[in-house]
Structures are given as structure tokens and as C-alpha cells.
Amino acid sequence: MPLSFYSSKLADAVNWARKYSLFQYPFVTACCGMEFMALWAPKYDVARFGAEFPRFSPRQSDLLIVVGTVTEKQGPVLRRIYDQMCEPKWVIAFGVCASTGGFYQNYSTMPGADQVIPVDVYVPGCPPRPEQALDALILLQERIQRGEGHSQVVLKQEKGFDVPLATIRPTAKAGG
Amino acid sequence: MATTDTLRRKVVFGETDLSDLDDVDLPAESMPLQMGPSHPAMHGTVRITLEVEGEKIKTSDIQIGYLHRCFEKEAEAATWTQIFPYTDRLNYVSPMLNNVGYAMAVEKLLDITGKIPERAQYIRVIVGEVSRITDHLTCIAASAMELGAFTVFFYLIKTREWLWELLEEVSGARLTHSYVRIGGVVADLPMGWSEKLLDVLGKVRTALSDADQMLTRNKIFRDRMDGVGVISKSDAAGWGLTGPVARSTGLAYDVRKDHPYLVYDRFDFDVPVGSTGDNFDRYACRLEEIYQSMRILEQALSGIPQGRIIIDDPRLALPAKRETYNTIEAMIAHFKLIMDGLHVPAGEVYSFTEGGNGELGFYLVSRGEGRPWKCRVRPPCFANLAVLTKVLPGLFIADVVPTFGMINMIGGECDR
Amino acid sequence: MATIVLDKLLERFTAAEVIETGSQHGDEWARVAPEAWLSIAEFLRDDPQLQMTMFIDLTCVDRIPDQPRFDVVLHLYSIEHKHRVRLLAGLPEADPVIDSLVSLWPGANWFEREAFDLYGVRFEGHPDLRRILLYPEFQGYPLRKDYPKEKRQPLLRRLPGSV
């Protein structure tokens, strides 16, 4: 048996373990958070998919779920949390505000979380039904199983650059 | 002379007699701590920058605005009816109440408040009270979860699911309904809905009594909530507090009782008023308000009349689909209403209703067009959260969690 | 609606201070001079027949092209007597400054910060006037009519390839 057989089986096993033990970081901002709470609830139980317990620390989680609208003020916070997570990490943009900005086109809303972090799965809906969110989770799990790479790796391979750490403009002191 | 160095040396070398050093002060400095915008207990993304000394908070700075989605600017660019989806996302745990509040403001500006069909008014009261129940359920569930009572969270969210299913039957969406229109509501209650609602209310009572048994006499819950985060009655008016937060301090102000609107004056219900203004009183006020809302619902469901569900005026309400497709007048009316928006005469109005958190006010300025010149929301939880700048100093860090939870700050409403 | 509030205002203050009063759609309103803002508000709060102790709302309206351009709007309520009033004060475009009401109602603090944040109206005597809903690096006052709705000021450099 060639070595690649064993290493690919090992990779499959590792991916299987990864996909069924996702530790989520729910970055909840807005109304989608209510549907997200409904995901945990007994009716649309997300625990069946192994992604049950939220770890409210980016150091301990591997799935960042951006739930709700991301504003410009929130951008550096989101970026910093993404950077604090360890590889491999995946991102789900939950809701149409996190995907593309929703129906908010104004001076304060960022048109989607993918402006500042790479996103793996987008879930449209305002708010999405819990079934859509579970579908997204299953899609992500299939992606993990195929080893298609998590966001950082994808960006490096496909687009050929390293995503740099966040650069925040120097803070002006007080006033407006 | 005794100094801190002497004290340190004595402590390090295990000296037990330290009485000669009683007047020495150990140097101490306060530590800045951030309960940042992404925090499990800061539901609604708020950043509270604390300066703590040990566990006690010295100063606090509450920074909001992480969910500023520019409701007013978007409203200035949308027609009067297109604003309804934006109002849904204000207080997103009780969206029907926001819809009703905004519709009533525009109707006040149009002077048609008395011409809304009675069935529409009853339906608005019914769906509004169901939304109020979901608001209080979510608040209690989330706060209990943050204190560790996970089971209560599951029971109450399961209950909320049943109510959402009913609202989905009525409006088509579980959470952001956009059900109310200017002049009435968009669709009638489905057949058999009233019976289903009464059935669900029975299940809500069971779940509430379970949650009550688990929390109200629970020593851990009481220790964390009693006497914590006290707001005095004299503060309530000066800070503009309304809703369960104000009523828990003893200020008996409820818009439904003091300035009845829609058909609230026909119903018999009580308004729970607290006495100490601590976290437990806020929790108890909310719990009791759910029971009172259920009373209103039972009375409304038994008394609802038949009739139209939207005002019969082609300048304000879309004509029925059958006519739109078959008569030219209705098609033109439909076209004008959609493209230009309904024309509201120039003027200003401030209209207020009882939202989930308190007095939800809409201040509208119209210049006679199909789009508002200004559409301001007076958010109840903006004022309710502001009082925490006075309440938090002196509390412990762990007290911030239940206090903030019981204020029920909803990011969409506070930041708009 | 009770007109006692407007009657007492007209009787207590001069015509230069209370410029115009009216009643529209059931709301009582009074347009006042910005110089008399604090004294009128204090009278409304302290007079025993009015007792407007509850602070409801403070906001600003951009009346362009009418002059004065900005109108600061205050809503007050009396819990004992159950009457309401709206006060409006016109401020010029060049330097919109008005007295702060924080000394009378502590709740006015955040509402005035918001009016400053979104309209640029400054409040004299406010203990901590800084932006509340937007971030400090934001330039301009977005709810003014001349600020385009979609003009973004990103705080963070965008990922290459994003819109």
C-alpha cells in the first residue's frame, strides 16, 4: 500500500473528527441572534450535529458564526476575534446582513462580514429559518470532510496572498 | 518606621505578628476591564469599559452604537409603507409592537385614528400582546441562562417557538413580520387561529410555572438578584425610565392604562408595580406582565368583531388584488401607492405606545410627500440603559451580568 | 389635550422667549428662543401645576432650506397631571449651540450626545460631549440632509477582492 493511501485515510479521519466536533463562537449582534437561539432550542436542536456548545472565547473555538449586521464600528472587533482564533478555523455568515449587508445600505453598515474576514458559507435570510442554518452547517461539514480547506488556507491557495493582520487607522482623540 | 517594604518582608518571611503595621497602606491601583462588544452576556453588543478595584467597580463607561443601522437615514429615503420592515428590526424580540407604534404615528398624522376598523384594532392588540409575551420570555430566558439556569432557557425558548409558529401563520415570518399597515393590518387571522392561540397560552402557563418554580424561590437566583442594581423611584422620571424597569421602582406608568390607545380601554388587566427597583423586581414585573398579557389576549379573542381589516380608502390602503387585476382605477391606485407612497399632509406628530421595554415613541415630520422628512424613534431602552451609568459604580463585576440582562437592552432599538 | 401648559408658558415668559405656540393633531408645541431654553425647561419642571418631571425625548431636525436650519426638539411629560409638551428651538447653521439640560434631567445626557453625534449640535454645559452611536474617527454629521446616505467611512482596511 502506498504511503499516500494511509495519509489520505488519516486526513479523512481527522476531517471527520473536525466536522463533528465544531466549537462555535457565536458573534451575535442583531435579530438573527434570536433565530440562532432557536437553533439551540430543543426543536431545531443543533446538538445533533455535534456543534452544540458555544465557546465564548475565540482561543477555544474553531467555527466563527457571524450572526447579524456588522457595522463599521464593529469591524475591528470582528477582525481581531477572527485573528485570535487558531487554525483550522471556519466562518459562517449567518443572515443576509452578515452576507451582503442586507437591505441596509448606509454610512454605518458594513456590506457583509466578508469585507474584513474570509467567509466559508453564507446563509441568506432575514432572519434565516433554523432549517437553513442547519443546512449551512451540513454544507460546511461536507466541505470540511472533503478537506477543501478553511478560509485562510483557501485564500492563500486560490488568491495567493497572506491575509494580513488588521490595520486600524490611528485613533483621533475625542471629538467628532 | 513601618513601611510597605517592612510589611512585605514580614509577610514573605512568615511573621505572624503584624500589629505594628496596621496603619500602613498597601499600594493599589484600579484595573481597567472591558466587557467587550462581543460577549456572551452583552446581548445586543454593548461595550462596558470598567475600572475595577479588586471586584468592585469604580467607574464604568457604557459604549453603544455597535449596531447603529441608521434607521432614521433609511427612513428618510423610503416611503411611509417601506419603513415597516425597518421598524421590525428595532426591537426585534417584539416586532409587532414596533409595527403598531409606527402605524399609529402615521395614522395620527393623517388624522384617521378613529377610522381604523375595529377588527383591525383588535388584531393589532392581539398580535401586539403575543409579541410582548415573546419579549418578556426572551429576556427572562437569556438572563437566566447567563446566571447558569440553562433549563429555564430551554423551557422558555421552546415556549417562544410555539408563539412564533402562530405569528408565522398570521404574517408569514417568524421574527420580522411587517404585518401592520397604515390603516389596519395586511391579512386577516387564519381560520382556527384563535383556538390554537388559546391552546398555546395554556402551554405557556405551564412553562411559566415551571420557570417560576425553578427561579423565584431559588436561593442562588435570589442572592444574585435581590438588592442588586437598585434604581430609586425618584431617579426614574429624571432619567426618562419607562416600562418594566420604571414600574419595578414603584413608578406606576403604563401607556396602555394612562393613555389608552386602540381598544385597550375595553380590557380588564392589572399593571404590576414593584417596590425596591432591584433586579428581582424587574424579573418579577416581567413575569407578572406575561400573565396580564395572557388575560388581555383571552378577553380580546372572545370579543373580536367581524369586519374589515384595513381602512377603506384607496389613497391609503392598497385595493384588493381582485380589483387591482380587473379594474383600471384600482390598478392606478395601487401603482401610485407603491411608487410615490401614500401622501401624508405636512405636519409633525409624536405618538407613543407601550413597547416591550417602555414608552416607544415615534416623532414624525412630514413635508407632504410620500417619504418622511424625519422619522425619529424614541427608544425606551436607550434611556433605560443610560441609568446604568449611575447604577453600575459600586457593584461587583459579577453583578453587571444580571443587571444588564434585566434592563433588557435590545441593540436594534438602542442603537437604531 | 390640556392647553394649560401653553397658557402658563405664555403668561410667564415674554413674546421674545416663547415665539409661537400651537396645537396640532392633539399635540401641544411651543417654539422658544434658544437663549431661554434652560429657563423655560426649568419652569416646566418645577412649576407645581405643570410638574413635567419626566424627560421623554430630545432630538434635532434639519429644516434645510428653511432658516434657522436646525431645530432642537424636546418632549416632556408630567406623570401627575398627564400632560405633554413639545419645545422647539431654532439654531443657525453656522454654529449650532444650545444649553444642555443635564443639570435638570440626568437622562438628557445620552440624548444630547446623540444629537451632537448625528447633527453636530453642541450642548453648552454637557459634562461629556462625545460621539455615542458612531466611532470617534468618523468625520461629519450623518443625519444632516447634505450627508449622502451611502457614504461609508470604513474603519478597517478592506480585504483585497471585496466590494
Image (cartoon, rainbow, N blue to C red):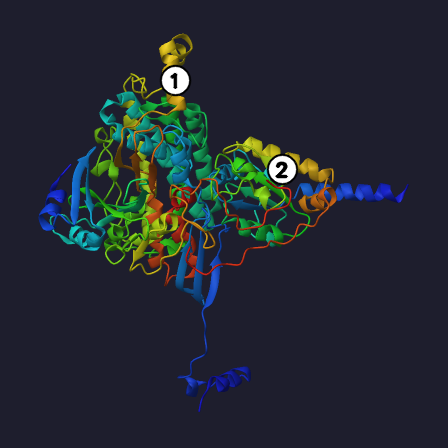
In x, y percent, where is residue B245? 31, 48
- Residue type (three-letter) at the residue carrying disc 2: Val
In x, y percent, where is residue B164? 44, 31
Q: Quadrant of the N terminus of chain B?
A: bottom left
**Residue that sits furthest to the right in the current view:** A1
Is B115 above or below relative to A53?
Answer: above
In the depicted view, which residue is nearer to us: B309 or C123? C123
Task: Determine if marks 2 and 1 fall on one subunit.
Answer: no
**Residue that sits furthest to the top in the current view:** B326
User: To which residue does mark 1 refer?
Assistant: B334
**Mark 2 residue element:** strand
Chain hosting mark 1: B
Q: Quadrant of the C terminus of chain B?
A: top left
Horizontally, residue C32 falls left or right of residue B191, namely left
Horizontally, residue B138 falls left or right of residue A19, namely left
Horizontally, residue A5 falls left or right of residue B205, namely right
Residue at the spot 42% in from the left edge and 45% down from the top edge:
B411
Q: What is the number of callouts on the image?
A: 2
Q: Is residue B343 visible?
A: yes
Chain hosting mark 2: A
Q: Tell me the tag on residue C14.
A: none
Q: Are marks 2 and 1 in contact (CB under 8 Å)?
A: no
Marks 2/1: CA distance? 39 Å
In x, y percent, where is residue A83? 62, 53
User: To which residue does mark 2 refer?
Assistant: A121
**Residue that sits furthest to the left in the current view:** C11
Residues packed near mark 2 inside 10 Å, few (<14), some (14 to 19) or many (20 plus): some
In x, y percent, where is residue B314? 32, 17
Q: Which of the 4 image quarters holds residue B351?
A: top left
